[in-house]
Image (tube, coloured by chain):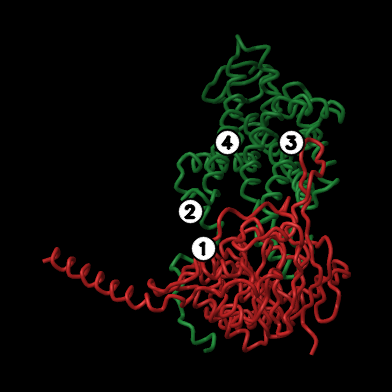
Amino acid sequence: MSALLEVAGLAKHFPVRRGAFGLVSGHVRAVDGVDFELRAGETLAIVGESGCGKSTVGRLVLRLIEPSAGQVRFEGEDLLALSDGAMRARRQRMQVIFQDPYASLNPRMTVGAMLGEPLMLHGLAKNEAARKARVGELLDLVGLRPDHARRYPHEFSGGQRQRLAIARALAVEPKLIVADEPVSALDVSIQAQVINLMRSLQQRFGLAYIFISHDLAVVKHIADRIAVMYLGKIVETATTDELFRNPRHPYTRALLAAVPLPDPTAARERTLLEGDIPSAMNPPSGCRFHTRCTFAREACKRDEPALADDGQAHATACPYWPEFPPPAVLAEAANRDADRIRLTRLQAAFVNNQQREAS
Amino acid sequence: MTATALPDVAVRDASEENPWARAWRRLKRRKGAMVGLAVVVLFVLVAILAPWVAPYDPIATSWSLVRKPPSWAHWLGTDEVGRDILSRVIWGARASLSAGLVSVGIALGIGVPLGLLAGYAGGWIDSVLSRIVDAMLAVPFLILAIALAAFLGPSLSNAMIAIGVTATPIFVRLTRGQTLAAKVEDYVEAARAVGNPHWRIALRHVLPNIVPPLLVQASLAIAGAIIAEAALSFLGLGQQPPSPSWGSMLNSAQRFIAQAPWMAFWPGFAIFFAVLSFNLLGDGLRDALDPRHK
């Protein structure tokens, strides 16, 4: 079966203009040669720090911004070759959910008008009554009530607004939804609700997601595969289980080390990232991560590593990964028990203290 | 787990009011704005009902009544050819208010589409339109209006056109700026992602969200246009005698300012109140429509 979406060599270089005459003084290489594939019904998560270009990838795939180079094939068709009008028609098959549900809903449109618009644009409802019925159905689908159609976005909470955004994306029955940090603006308790909603909708309608996030903990619950991005390039891709169990690229390892664990005594690798992400206007030579990499060596400053697949769908853009020590998770298992006993004792002492003070 | 099994979270119990209803509720709380609105409505009613509320024919002269001070028969006195000033002020409201409304209507009608085009399309279209606007704004408002009115020939309708065209650049600039700010909003990108054509994004998604500042500017521009009409009429480029307008009444009054000050006082008073009340209304609208104010 061929892929739903094939992306090859995708790049976006934003020109930087300076001075009175708007001369181009450089380019921000937000996305610099990205390849990936997505099958129908699959979820690919793209993770990375702020500014690594992950949101730009999402927008390029949907052609909300025009790529500088590369190819985007959707259902076998080259999207970049399409005219404006033809591209508009294709938008029925691919939709988007934005990060901030307070900004992504038009404040002067009722929910009904907002959800009815895509139906009207793509001729999906024959008349007013059919449109109304479909809007009610969509609201029901995301756990809201059909009579909410008369309301304006400001009357809803953040989580509800994100559900509205999901309903808008679903209105045209797409095959692909690009979700750009869909839960990072929401409370943690609401995040789970929205993630669960997205998962159940995926099962029901066979949706494929590109799930863009900086939060590996969230991604773990929804993604089939993960692509880790750093400074406009993918540095590692693998299935979710494989990536969490067996991270290879030093950057992936650092990201995983930064995921908070519920167990305070759990020992773990201490490869915290230092410094900021370098400027995408002037990325480091060779491997772009070498300025912050614990394992960097001389050759890294010179040679740009390619994303090499190991034959089992785990690709890493670092040729030296087999030489690195295994991640230190669970390394000091012996000490852990001692730590845990000490923690329990401390907690007990604290509770006793509180009770004494209260009485 | 299915979607319908999700907990049905109660929607915040805000009253189901649209943004305009909310703005109206907030406007009602502002005394200045409501006074302004009341005076505006009063002026508009007087202008519309002029034939019925004016006690005399505004252009009927009487040689026995030349420059009479206010009396029971003529509450505001009479002018240099014996015409009733109250009647002329009432009929003059027609010229002044219609000049204000029509010229601002012209300015909105030309300025908003051009501003929307410049802001949304960007590129060379924006550059060309913006330079023209800059050039027009470099000339003082009244000078440009006078030049245009003189070029078109003296009449009230030409004065309206002149004022309208002169007031256009400020609306182009305002609309362009607001459009630039609105078009980078997520909801505009979402509208694109849904498959809206550009014209629909501009009209349905950008325009409704930039109406509030335009409305404020329009109400302030009406005040400016009323003054401009008075100035043009004062110079003889607006309303032509014997039809009354506040500006032309001031023009004829200036020669008798010592002997018959009431001739100048009442039209001046009318201009003052009309302009003040439009300004009060505009200020109130600005506050009521600003989402940052609670």
Rounded to the nearest whole Å, what is the CA distance between mark 4 and mark 1? Answer: 27 Å
A118 vs A29: above or below = below
* Chain containing mark 3: B
Helix, strand or loop for disc 1: loop
- Say what secondary structure mark 2 lies in: helix
Mark 4–mark 2 CB contact (< 8 Å): no
Q: Residue at x 75, y 78 (%)?
A: A37
Say whether marks 4 and 3 touch (CB < 8 Å). no
User: In the displayed structure, does residue A344 sit left or right of residue B245?
Assistant: left
For chain A, the rendered hue is red
* Circles 1 and 2 on the same chain: yes
Q: Amino acid at mark 4?
A: Asn
Rounded to the nearest angstrom, the CA distance separating label 4 from label 3 is 16 Å
Earlier residue among tags 2 and 3:
2
Which numbered marker is on residue B17?
1
User: Where residue A179 appears, x then y in whole percent?
Assistant: 64, 72
Task: Name the residue tied to disc 3.
Answer: B167
> x, y (%) of residue B214?
66, 46
Q: CA distance from mark 1 to mark 2?
A: 10 Å
Q: Quadrant of residue A175?
A: bottom right
Residue at mark 4 to residue at mark 2: CA–CA distance:
19 Å
Q: What's the CA distance linking mark 2 and mark 3? A: 30 Å
Q: Residue at (58%, 66%) from the top-left corner? A: A214
Amino acid, disc 3: Ala
Q: Quadrant of residue A22?
A: top right
Q: Which residue is mark 4?
A: B279
Image-quadrant location for residue A208: bottom right
